[in-house]
Image (cartoon, rainbow, N blue to C red):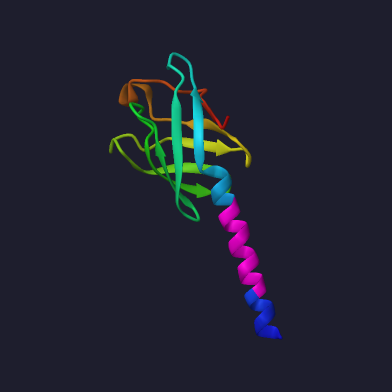
Amino acid sequence: MKINLVNNAFILLTIVLLSSCAKLAGNYQLSAPDVKAHSVKVVSLDKDRYYMQADGEKFSGTYRLEKEILILEKPDLPRLTEYKWLWDGKKILTLIAEPAFPTAGQRYLPATLTKP
């Protein structure tokens, strides 16, 4: 009986984690000052890592989710590592940190990514 309860708890935790991954992953619409709106894709790599594909944008790369914050770990452009997005748990990511302006060249704050 005890083993069965442990197995059931593990299965439930796995379902909850996978559903959180599924909620964050998907197609988003970028909205930022002086940037043409376009699609951005977020793909789940595992329970707390995601790949953000934003063609032509400097914030593309592999992110780690810590609580509700996506932190850029491995950028496609190696010198740009300071991007952080706040996830509302539903369908909006809000940019909360970016590299210094001279490094990045393009400013995105206050950008949002919204699922349609």
**Quarter of the C terminus within the rendering:** top right
Along the line of sight, the residue nearer the viewer: 96 or 92: 92
Along the line of sight, the residue nearer the viewer: 82 or 115: 115
Left or right: 45 as drawn, with respect to 89: left
- The residue lying furthest to the right in this view is 1
Q: Position of residue 109 (x, y in %)?
A: 49, 23
Along the line of sight, the residue nearer the viewer: 100 or 104: 104
Q: Is 16 covered by the magenta stretch? A: yes
Q: Position of residue 59 (x, y in %)?
A: 39, 32
Residue at the spot x=35%, y=29% of the render? Answer: 55
**Quarter of the N terminus within the rendering:** bottom right
Query: From which residue to which does the magenta span run?
Result: 8-19
| Overall secondary structure of the magenta section | helix
Q: How many marks?
A: 0
Left or right: 58 as drawn, with respect to 19: left
Residue at the spot x=48%, y=16% of the render? Answer: 33
- The residue lying furthest to the left in this view is 78
Q: Is 55 covered by the magenta stretch? A: no
Left or right: 12 as drawn, with respect to 85: right
Residue at the spot x=44%, y=13% of the render? Answer: 34
- The residue lying furthest to the bottom in this view is 1
Q: Position of residue 15 (x, y in %)?
A: 61, 60
Name the quadrant containing residue 78: top left
- 31, above or below 1, in the image: above
- 24, above or below 98, in the image: below
Name the quadrant containing residue 79: top left
Q: Position of residue 100 (x, y in %)?
A: 38, 26
